[in-house]
Amino acid sequence: MNTVSGKRAARMGARQIYETLRDQIVEQVYGVDGLLPSSRALAGELGVSRTTVTVAYEQLAAEGFIETRHGARPRVARTVVERGRPRGVSKPSARNRRLSNFGERLRRNPPRWTEPPGDLVANFRYGDLSPSDFPVLAWKKAVVATLSRRPVRLAYDDPCGSLRLRTALQGYLWRSRSVRCDVDQIVVVNGSQQGLDICARMLLDAGDRFVMEDPGYLMAKHAFSATGAVAVPVAVDRDGLETEQLATIEARLAYVTPSHQYPLGGVLPIGRRHQLLAWARRFDAYVIEDDYDSEYRYDTKPVPPLHALEGSGNVVYLGTISKTLSPTLRIGYLVVPPGMQSAFGAAKQIMDRHSPQVGQEALATILESGAYERHVRRVRRRNAERRQALLDALRRRFGGKVRIDGADAGLHVVVWFDDLPQGCEEALIRLARSKGVGVYPVSVLFDRRRQGRRPRPEVVGLVMGFAALEAGQIERGCKLLAQAVDEVGHRRIR
């Protein structure tokens, strides 16, 4: 129920009920065609007579807010299309609401979120996975097994995560990524974003500086900047972070994606990895190593993570199952330096006590059985096929007019359109959307403040994810994208 309750509700008259429901309808608490409670149900909840509620409903109906029919619940009228507040009803301005410094920073610079349209022929949004890839049977069996155990514990759990899952992750990380760690170094988190948030709160204070790859992952930058820390953008090239630029930079931490730089796809060479670790030791800084899609390598051999190298005592390793199973499960993990688990666990406990137990135990089950690694091998093959379908379609439709970065690994590529200046970006994205194709610019991932080199690309660049699409969708999407590119190019010439 969306109505007010408690002692005040017991004293409500018809006028107050009318005003409350009217405001809720106007503010879309109840959408158009939304059903309101029956007069009997609402009267019982508010502790008033049914007649009082009926009077309020009659006034709402008389003013056109709801439609009533004998024997049916009142329904919000279809004619209620204006979303402004009715005359005489004031709403406090958001500018008058005082927030903490943290809140003000988020209000000034909130993360971007746009709901993807559901009617696209092909949506090349990065991060989405194909529903057909999810191991429904294996996951269902694991969840049922978890819920069938006796006795079922209905109690708060270790904030650092299920011991069983952390033990299973310890073995998996050693087998798959050569990461050696104690179980006590692993903290289970609700996806990599919570891992970043915990790192930000534990390692940064307002005014501290942190190194960001440029271009780089915006949600990491948002997490760190929200503490009041200041980003220091460092350029990336085809090999990842240009670590020689760190020589004169003193910062509290560096966030890197060394196994597959996001978004440009470079793999940090071993020499640069050692330079980065030496920088961290010199300034007593931390390195956040986001190994977000290390399971997907196609044309190159796996590179040992920073955490596996000598001198990696300042590295916090961040992993997730969002790119292998599903981002909806919200399970990730941190491997923190020895001696820091209790502090990170305390932060996790304050945030949300612990991650959901059923999901943790189900993941532990499929890790222990080997089903997870079999699943990873299967989806790696399927995504290799999707990647090849995208590369073939791009070459067929655009030939030498595009350059492609980051195709050796991961679940996306960056496509540069050399014949389209950067100023055409917005028009291309809008026109492609009108044709049923979702494409997303790389330009927003660059820091505009970086000095020296040009901070943003001179031509249109798109981040194109492929893991949620099948070959036919990829081909059709690239065909329609090519039409949009041609139309934008012709408009520019005219």
Image: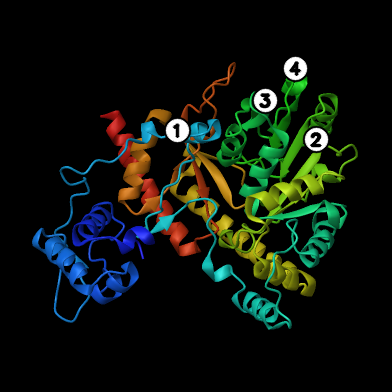
- Tell which tag, 1 or 4, sits nearer the viewer: 1
- Residue placed furthest toward the right: 310
Q: Which residue is mark 1?
A: 98
In the rendered structure, find residue 209 and report the number of the disc placed on it: 3
Q: CA distance from mark 1 to mark 4?
A: 39 Å
Q: CB atoms at circles 4 and 3 under 8 Å apart?
A: no
Q: How many marks?
A: 4
- Of residues 50 and 19, the one nearer the viewer is 50
Q: Which residue is mark 4?
A: 248
Residue 122 sits in which quadrant? bottom left
- Dot 2 or dot 1, earlier in sequence: 1
Along the horizontal axis of the image, is 232 left or right of 54?
A: right
- Tell which tag, 4 or 3, sits nearer the viewer: 3
Local crowd at mark 1 within 10 Å, few (<14), some, or many (≥20)?
A: few
Q: CA distance from mark 4 to mark 2?
A: 17 Å
- Tell which tag, 3 or 1, sits nearer the viewer: 1
Q: CA distance from mark 4 to mark 3?
A: 13 Å
Residue 230 sits in which quadrant? top right
Q: Which residue is mark 2?
A: 273
- Residue placed furthest toward the left: 62
- Dot 3 or dot 2, earlier in sequence: 3
Q: CA distance from mark 3 to mark 2?
A: 20 Å
Q: Residue 254: in sight, yes or no?
A: yes
In the rendered structure, which amino acid carries the disc numbered 2? Arg
- Dot 3 or dot 1, earlier in sequence: 1
Report the residue at 22% width, 54% height from top. Answer: 19
SS for callout 2:
helix
Q: CA distance from mark 3 to mark 1?
A: 26 Å
